[in-house]
Amino acid sequence: LAKSFLYGCIGAGVLATALAIFIDKSAAIMIKGLVSTTSSDSLSRLQRTYLAAYLCAMMADWLQGPFVYALYASYGFTREENATLFVAGFGSSAVFGTFVGSLADKYGRRNFAGLYCLLYLLSCLTKHFKAYWMLMIGRITGGIATSLLFSVFDSWLVSEHTARGF
C-alpha cells in the first residue's frame, strides 16, 4: 500500500472518531472524566487504572509482533521451522484459552493479570537465544500469555465494576 493511502485512512479514522464524540455529548463527558486526573469519581479512577495496565500490556504485544518472523529468520531458521514456532504459539493460545478463564475466576483475575506479565516477560526473554527449543518455550508461554491478555483484563474490569456497585 502507498504511504499516502495509509496515512489518509488513519486520518479519516481519527476524524470520524472525533466527529462521533462531538455528536454524542455523553461520550464527550465520559472521555473528559477519563482523561481528567483531578476527577475524584471512583469509576473514572477505576477506568484509568484499567486502561493504564491494559494499554501497556497490549502495546507490549503489538510492539514485538511484527518483528518476530524477521528475528527467527535472522537466526537462520527455515520457513518451515519458523512456521512451526508460530503454530506452537497460536496452538498453545487455543488450547490454554479454553480453560484459563475459569482458572482466573477461581484464583483471582488480578493475579492472572500479573501471571500474564510474568509469562510475557519469559516469552520475550527467550527471544535472545538462538536455540530452537528455547524459542519454542517462548512461543508456548507467549501463547498462554495471549490467552490471558484477551480474557483476564476484561473480566477483571467487569468484576471490579460489579464489586464496587457501579
Image (tube, rainbow, N blue to C red):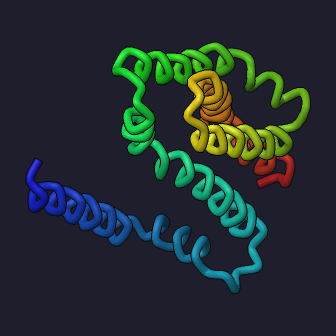
- Res. 155 visible in picture: no
**Foreground residue among 56 and 81:** 81
Q: Using the rendered view, name the quadrant where residue 69 is placed.
A: top left
Q: Is residue 141 above or below residue 20?
A: above
Q: Is residue 68 left or right of residue 96?
A: left
Question: Residue reaching furthest bottom?
Answer: 38
Q: Is residue 4 left or right of residue 135?
A: left
- Check the picture and name the quadrant holding the C terminus: bottom right
Residue at image position (73%, 69%) is 45
Q: Is residue 20 above or below residue 127?
A: below
Q: Is residue 152 left or right of residue 2?
A: right
Residue at image position (79%, 40%) is 115
**Foreground residue among 140 and 18:** 140
Q: Using the rendered view, name the quadrant where residue 152 is placed.
A: top right
Q: Is residue 135 above or below residue 116?
A: above
Residue 95: x percent and y percent? 64, 13
Residue at image position (29%, 64%) is 14
- Res. 37 visible in picture: yes
**Foreground residue among 12 and 131:** 131
Q: Using the rendered view, name the quadrant where residue 145 is placed.
A: top right
Total number of numbered labels? 0
Residue at image position (42%, 23%) is 82
Residue 133: x percent and y percent? 63, 22
Residue 138: x percent and y percent? 63, 31
Question: Residue reaching furthest right?
Answer: 107
